[in-house]
């Protein structure tokens, strides 16, 4: 067992007013499997980079283990060369054993890394790092673009390993893999034993407790303020009465009256101190509660149904069809999830509906003038300012920015060029644009890659509330099961 001690850590990027981390301290056991969570922009990847010593910081990070980071860049090489370079001491049988644990054919070792699929590349990189040994892995979002089968293989593989820190926004994946959660909050970094679901349940309890305490303290403050004001007023009146005369014309006992006024003033001061204490207690509440503002979608409605009819549909590449025939309809209010292995043709169906020239068999019919809102899998086209992007895409800028604000964008984020944003922020731009559009049907291709869990929940809630017609590809099983009204699972031909 080894420990990683973080003491009084503070860090902020140059030019930023507020620090990402301010005087945070905690301890990590390297036998733990930690899931690192937090909203986009909270500093998850930055924290991993701080552990690696890549940025200067205040405070201290002490450890007696070496860190390795996933993913790492590789040059154009055979996969086996990469493994041997990272873990030169291992033998071929050990490499093959690791790949077997991932249910992966060992022939990928003898292919160029750059032509491997995304899932195969993930496996080669992770196998290399785990075989290296005597290191603590910092695994940053390994599941993006991976199909459900590959994710399940990765779950089984990581369950056989010792400690690591895993950044992921996939709730099912976290629940199956980690035994501790490290959460980057608004004011601190918190560690809890358990998986994501247990952390979420504890978070809800804590949030509810703080809401109730906040309400109670506010009532106490209001009551004490009234009492303090009344006591102070009574003290003033009594003090002034020292100079009056009573009905018999004799003077009032000024010593007694002054004593009473002083007692009332002292009581007023005690009440003011209680108010200050309550205000201080109240200031320590609700600081780590994230706003979960409601997103809004306004779909265009039409009486023309069905929107789309597919009969015995198959995508064809050259002379080869890639999945078994599919027959389905899309009617208003349907939310269809297309699932299947990587390469099964999921995105190709979406592109065919969007009007791209893709070879296919069977028939695909769509009603005329169907207005479509599309979220692409890629963010590479995003450049320039948010204002320019809103104008180019003909969306109302105020609505577009309001949706981004609800998804956690700050003022500094609004001023950032699109190409300089994180992948999570870029995905939010695409989604905010889409839900700001009125459309008959929303077609989303892997929209949730890099998107934080809270934003995923906001999107889920909006879809269930406004019931847009959708066809989407998404590997987050929790999301698909929650919002889909129908699932089309593509099976490869042959």
Image: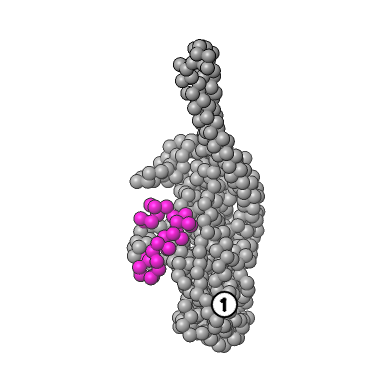
Q: Which residues are magenta?
A: 389-416
Front position in the image: 447 or 256: 256
Q: Quadrant of residue 31?
A: top right
Residue 33: x %, y % from top left = 61, 48
Of 362 and 72, nearer the camera is: 362
Q: Is residue 400 magenta?
A: yes
Image check: 189 left or right of 391? right
- Residue 241: x percent and y percent? 48, 19
Query: Who's the residue at 35% across and 68% down the image?
Result: 391
* Residue at position x 53%, y 14% in the image: 248
Measured along the vertical axis of the image, is residue 109 above or below residue 454? below
Residue assigned mark 1 = 332
Which percent across, then down, holds residue 261?
Answer: 51, 19
Would you say residue 161 sits in the magenta stretch?
A: no
Label 1 secondary element:
loop
Q: Is residue 212 visible?
A: yes
């Amino acid at each position: 067992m080894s420990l990683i001690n973080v003491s009084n850590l503070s860090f902020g990027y140059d030019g930023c007013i507020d620090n990402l981390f301010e005087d945070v301290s905690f301890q990590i056991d390297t036998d733990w499997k930690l899931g690192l969570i937090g909203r986009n922009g909270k500093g998850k990847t930055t924290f991993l980079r701080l552990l690696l010593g890549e940025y200067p910081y205040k405070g201290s990070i002490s450890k007696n283990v070496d860190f390795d980071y996933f993913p790492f860049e590789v040059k154009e090489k055979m996969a086996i060369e990469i493994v041997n370079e990272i873990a030169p001491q291992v033998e071929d049988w050990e490499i093959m054993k690791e790949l077997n644990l991932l249910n992966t054919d060992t022939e990928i070792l003898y292919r160029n890394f750059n032509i491997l699929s995304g899932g195969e590349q993930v496996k080669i990189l992770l196998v290399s790092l785990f075989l290296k040994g005597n290191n603590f892995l910092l695994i940053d979002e390994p599941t993006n673009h991976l199909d459900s089968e590959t994710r399940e293989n990765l779950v089984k593989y990581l369950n056989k390993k010792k400690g690591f820190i895993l950044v992921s926004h996939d709730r099912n994946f976290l629940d199956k893999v980690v035994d501790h959660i490290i959460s980057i909050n608004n004011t601190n970094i918190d560690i809890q034993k358990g998986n994501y679901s247990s952390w979420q349940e504890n978070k809800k309890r804590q949030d509810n407790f703080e809401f109730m305490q906040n309400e109670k303290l506010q009532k106490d403050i209001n009551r004490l303020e009234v009492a303090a004001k009344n006591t102070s007023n009574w003290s003033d009146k009594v003090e002034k009465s020292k100079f009056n005369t009573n009905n018999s014309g004799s003077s009032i006992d000024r010593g007694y009256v002054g004593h009473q006024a002083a007692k009332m003033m002292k009581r007023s001061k005690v009440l003011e101190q209680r108010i200050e204490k309550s205000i201080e207690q109240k200031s320590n509440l609700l600081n780590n509660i994230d706003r979960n503002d409601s997103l809004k979608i306004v779909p265009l409605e039409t009486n023309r149904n069905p929107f789309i009819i597919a009969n015995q549909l198959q995508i064809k590449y050259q002379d080869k069809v890639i999945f078994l025939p599919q027959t389905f309809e899309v009617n208003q209010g349907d939310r269809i999830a297309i699932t299947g292995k990587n390469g099964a043709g999921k995105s190709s169906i979406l592109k065919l509906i969007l009007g791209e020239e893709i070879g296919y068999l069977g028939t695909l019919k769509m009603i005329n003038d169907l207005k479509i809102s599309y979220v692409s899998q890629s963010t590479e086209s995003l450049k320039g300012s948010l204002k320019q992007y809103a104008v180019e895409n003909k969306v109302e800028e105020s609505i577009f920015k309001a949706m981004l604000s609800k998804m956690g964008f700050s003022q500094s984020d609004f001023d950032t060029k699109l190409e300089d944003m994180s992948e999570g922020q870029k995905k939010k731009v695409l989604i905010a644009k889409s839900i700001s559009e009125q459309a008959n049907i929303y077609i989303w291709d892997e929209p949730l890659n890099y998107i934080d869990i809270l934003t995923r929940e906001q999107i889920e809630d909006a879809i269930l509330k406004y019931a847009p017609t959708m066809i989407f590809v998404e590997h987050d099983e929790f999301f698909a099961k929650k919002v889909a009204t129908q699932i089309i699972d593509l099976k490869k031909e042959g």
